Image: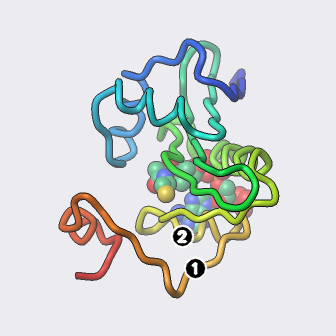
Amino acid sequence: MNLRYQDNCNNISWERVVEILKQVGMSYTDPEKHKISFEVSHAVVFVFDGDNLIGIGRVISDGVRQSAMYDIAVDPAYQGHRIGQEIVSRLLTATSGCNCILYASPGKEGFYKRLGFKKMKTGMAFFTNPQRMVDGGFVEE
Ligand SMILES: CC(C)(COP(=O)(O)OP(=O)(O)OC[C@H]1O[C@@H](n2cnc3c(N)ncnc32)[C@H](O)[C@@H]1OP(=O)(O)O)[C@@H](O)C(=O)NCCC(=O)NCCS
C-alpha cells in the first residue's frame, strides 16, 4: 500500500465516491450532490492508494463549537488497516475544540467508542425519509 491522505476536494472523482458508498452499503445520491456536500464541509479527508480513492470522510462545523461527521467509509478491500481511524482522527483534529456528533451505522458503534465517542441518550434527528431510517435500524418508529 502506498497511502496518501488529502484534505481538499481537488481532482476527486465523485463517481468513485458514490461507488465507495455503494460498496459499503451507505446511502448515496447523484455524484454532483456529493461534490457539493464535500465542498461545503468544514474539513474533508480522502485517502488514496496510488491513484485509487479508497477512503473518504467529512465533517460539517461552525469551526468553534459544534460539528457533525458524515460519510466515513473505507473500501472493503482496505478495511482493518486503521485507515478509518485515521480519517476520523484527522477530522477531529480539524475541528478541535468542537463537540462532534454522528450517527453510526448499526454495528459500527464500537468503532467510534474506541475513538472516544459516547452513546447519546437524548439524540434526536429530523430525517427527510424517516421510514428509511427506521428500516435501516437507525431510529425507533
Ligand atoms: C467503519 C469503518 C469506517 C472502519 O474503518 P477501518 O479502516 O476498517 O477500521 P480501522 O482499521 O481504522 O479500525 C480501528 C479500530 O476499530 C476497530 N473496529 C473496526 N470496526 C469495528 C466495529 N464495527 N466494531 C468495533 N470495533 C471496530 C478495529 O478492530 C480497530 O481496532 P484496533 O485499533 O484494536 O485494531 C469501515 O469498516 C467502513 O467503511 N465500514 C462501512 C461503512 C460504515 O459503516 N461507515 C461508518 C458509517 S457511520
- Disc 1 residue type (three-letter): Lys
Relative image position of residue 53 (x, y in whole percent): 54, 24
Kindly indicate whether the residue at mark 2 contacts the one at mark 1 (C-beta within 8 angstroms).
yes
User: Residue 61 got which mark?
Assistant: none
Side (left or right) of 75 relative to 1: left
Real-space CA distance between mark 1 and mark 2, rounded to the nearest whole angstrom: 8 Å
**SS of the residue under disc 1:** loop
What residue appears at the point 51 percent right and 33 percent down from the top-left corner? Answer: 38
- Disc 2 residue type (three-letter): Glu
Relative image position of residue 119 (x, y in whole percent): 57, 79
Q: Nearer the viewer, residue 106 or 71?
A: 71
**Residue topped by disc 1:** 119
What residue appears at the point 37 percent right and 21 percent down from the top-left corner? Answer: 15
Which label sits in the foreground, 1 or 2? 1
What residue appears at the point 60 percent right and 15 percent down from the top-left corner? Answer: 10
Looking at the picture, does residue 134 appear above or below residue 93? Answer: below
Q: Nearer the viewer, residue 129 or 107?
A: 129
Q: Say which quadrant the C terminus sits in.
A: bottom left
Side (left or right) of 9 relative to 97: left
- Considering every residue shown, the one lying at the far left of the view is 131
The reply to whether the residue tagged 2 has its Cβ within 8 angstroms of ligand 1 is yes
**Residue topped by disc 2:** 109
Side (left or right) of 116 relative to 130: right
- Quarter of the rendered structure image containing ligand 1: bottom right
Relative image position of residue 97 (x, y in whole percent): 81, 60
Q: Which coloring applies here? A: rainbow
Bin the neighbour count of mark 1 within 10 Å (Cα to Cα): few under 14, some 14-19, many 20 and up. some
Looking at the picture, does residue 47 appear above or below residue 101? Answer: above
